[in-house]
Image: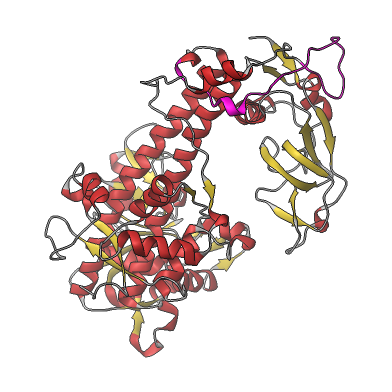
């Protein structure tokens, strides 16, 4: 494939407004150098475009505008006038643009790029058909990655919802019902205060960076110590299986249960909590400490100098609600079942990311036979112009002029190639979620599921495959970064309001189904869902399910 500089392929401009031009109720998209979309009362651009942040932390990111009118920040670059398939350009830039800037950024306090960075960036140009094939293939993998991330995020939300359903909102529990963390622990201490003698190998020495919410991360700079140093440190602080670790210096408040049978030591930035296992379940305690109420308490009790610290005295006084141990154990069983599903989803996500990286490298270098992939003929242009010279201009046409007859289009359109190399189907044109009201979605779900049980995957499959509805989903993290997403009519809000009773058209009840013990007698599913479940083992079938509350009685 021949490579061309971007200055020969597109026009390159910037916006004229600063960030203060953004509004909460504007009619048009406003692209800045920040992640996420904002709103503007005006627009200066229209049509498909690629947008590149020109300064700040997000230099190297790539945004795609599908055709709506939009406004642009003064340091964001707009690429338009491309005579190829825009999403091909988007995916190529997404794969290689950031890498090209590793040694090509300017500035000290705020990094930035120059127009010449963009003008000189080279891109290979395959045939228009192959541009469509490449873009559709990568988009299919990207959509699958997004769906997997959303599933993982939703599983986390389901655990939190189950916790609140079983124990209530921690912030609303009366103070007399709370006791101190010290009362439910046999020991609360922190790691080694002096600098340990590190070695290149040996016994792991963990710090706050290794403590993530819900798990231990050994991929982030693990240090090691020798046996003698370990024995010295462990006399005061000896972490064991089922103990709890709390990051207490730097980024405070991350909590994990020790789920490995392996000796290791801790430094000062990690607190060790040894629960009284006869009265408190470690996993219940972990989720209690992760609740918003307790995280606020941890923040409030943290001492701040150059970095935040919460000391053992304050940790011991953290408020704890102690329901009956049997109730805690029931919740822990549910949470761990969901966590097992989440671990499998995360493993699949890792595989998908590796697949995307491999495929994106191969398709752009011509190492994949693209003829095995179908092409949507409706995306093909009727003609493209022939370049008249080789000098840079605002928009350079690099495709051979070609009239396409109806017969040729139909031939491509009806071409049915089976056995795709990576097992991906052609991308279907799905209806947007915004085209449907909550009432329409609720009516369809009530008609389809009726008295049957269903989980989040079943709902998504029904909306996607049966109704061709493209589901929008904003994670909690995205909502925190972009408050305007909080009230978006998306899948998460639809489900959340159905569970809390705020959805006027649908009321759902949430239960945990254990397929191994059959804890819900006479549970039923739709024929399609029964077929899907039959391919899974009992552990995979177990998890959080919903039913339409107005249709059946509580089990």
Residue at the front extreme, as displayed = 407
Query: Magenta residues, as a range?
Result: 372-397
Q: Is residue 311 left or right of residue 58?
A: left
Instruction: Count numbered badges in the picture.
Output: 0
Q: Residue at x 70, y 48 (%)?
A: 34
Q: Residue 381 in the image: state x and y as whole percent.
A: 67, 23
Q: Is residue 121 left or right of residue 475?
A: right
Q: Position of residue 100 (x, y in %)?
A: 67, 24
Confirm whether the magenta stretch covers residue 554: no
Q: Nearer the viewer, residue 18 or 410?
A: 410
- Front-most of residues 512 and 427: 427
Q: From the viewer's side, name the closer residue of 83 and 64.
A: 83
Coloring scheme used:
secondary structure
Whether residue 310 is visible, yes or no, is no
Image point (13%, 55%), residue name: 516
Q: Position of residue 305 (x, y in %)?
A: 62, 63
User: Majority secondary structure of the magenta segment?
Assistant: loop
User: Is 386 a magenta residue?
Assistant: yes
- Name the residue located 57 percent from the left edge and 56 percent from the top edge: 434
Residue 21: which quarter of the image?
bottom right
- Dividing the image into 4 quarters, which one contains the C terminus? bottom left
Percent x, y for residue 109?
Answer: 78, 43
Q: Is residue 285 visible?
A: yes
Q: Is residue 477 or residue 253 the one in the foreground?
A: 477
Classify 181 as above or below 42: below
In the displayed structure, would residue 98 be above or below residue 309?
above
Q: Quarter of the image containing the N terminus? A: top right
The furthest residue to the bottom: 176
In which quadrant of the rendered view does residue 89 lie? top right
């Amino acid at each position: 494939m021949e490579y061309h500089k971007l200055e020969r392929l597109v026009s390159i401009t910037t916006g004229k407004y600063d960030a203060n031009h953004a509004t909460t109720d504007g009619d048009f998209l406003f692209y800045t150098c920040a992640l996420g979309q904002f709103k503007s009362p005006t627009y200066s651009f229209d049509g498909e475009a690629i947008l590149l942040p020109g300064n700040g932390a997000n230099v190297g990111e790539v945004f795609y505008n599908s055709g709506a009118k939009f406004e642009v920040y003064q340091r964001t670059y707009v690429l338009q006038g491309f005579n190829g398939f825009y999403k091909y350009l988007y995916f190529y830039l997404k794969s290689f643009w950031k890498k090209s800037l590793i040694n090509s950024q300017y500035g000290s306090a705020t990094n930035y790029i120059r127009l010449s960075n963009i003008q000189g960036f080279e891109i290979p140009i395959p045939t228009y058909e192959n541009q469509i094939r490449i873009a559709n293939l990568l988009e299919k993998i990207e959509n699958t990655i997004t769906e997997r991330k959303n599933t993982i995020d939703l599983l986390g939300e389901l655990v939190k919802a189950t916790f609140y359903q079983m124990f209530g909102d921690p912030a609303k529990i009366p103070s007399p019902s709370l006791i101190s963390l010290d009362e439910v622990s046999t020991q609360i201490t922190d790691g080694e205060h002096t600098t340990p003698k590190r070695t290149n190998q040996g016994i792991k020495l963990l710090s706050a960076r290794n403590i993530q919410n819900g798990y231990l991360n050994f991929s982030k700079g693990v240090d090691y110590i020798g046996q003698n140093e370990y024995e010295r440190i462990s006399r005061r602080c000896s972490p064991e299986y089922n103990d709890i670790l709390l990051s207490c210096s730097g980024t405070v408040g991350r909590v994990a249960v020790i789920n490995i049978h392996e000796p290791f030591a801790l430094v000062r930035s990690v607190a060790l909590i040894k629960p009284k296992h006869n009265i408190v379940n470690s996993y219940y305690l972990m989720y209690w400490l992760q609740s918003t109420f307790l995280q606020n308490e941890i923040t409030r009790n943290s001492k701040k100098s150059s970095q935040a610290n919460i000391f053992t005295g304050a940790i011991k006084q953290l408020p704890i609600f102690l329901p009956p141990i049997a109730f805690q154990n029931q919740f822990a069983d549910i949470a761990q079942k969901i966590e097992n599903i989440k671990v499998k989803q995360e493993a699949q996500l890792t595989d998908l990311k590796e697949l995307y990286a491999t495929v994106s490298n191969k398709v752009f270098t011509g190492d994949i036979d693209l003829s095995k992939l179908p092409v949507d003929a409706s995306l093909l242009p009727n003609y493209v112009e022939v370049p008249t010279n080789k000098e840079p201009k605002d928009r350079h046409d690099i495709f051979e002029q070609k009239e396409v007859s109806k017969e040729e289009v139909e031939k491509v359109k009806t071409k049915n190639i089976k056995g795709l190399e990576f097992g991906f189907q052609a991308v279907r044109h799905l209806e947007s979620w915004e085209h449907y009201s909550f009432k329409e979605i609720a009516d369809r779900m009530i008609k389809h599921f009726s008295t049957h049980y269903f989980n989040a995957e079943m709902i998504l499959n029904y909306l996607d495959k049966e109704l061709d509805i493209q589901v929008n989903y904003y994670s909690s993290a995205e909502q925190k970064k972009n408050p305007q997403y909080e009230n978006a009519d998306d899948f998460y809000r639809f489900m959340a309001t159905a569970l809390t009773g705020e959805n006027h058209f649908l009321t759902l009840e949430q239960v945990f189904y254990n397929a191994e013990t059959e804890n819900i007698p006479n549970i039923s599913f739709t024929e399609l869902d029964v077929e899907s479940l039959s391919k899974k083992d009992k552990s995979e079938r177990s998890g959080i399910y919903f039913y339409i509350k107005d249709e059946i009685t509580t089990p």
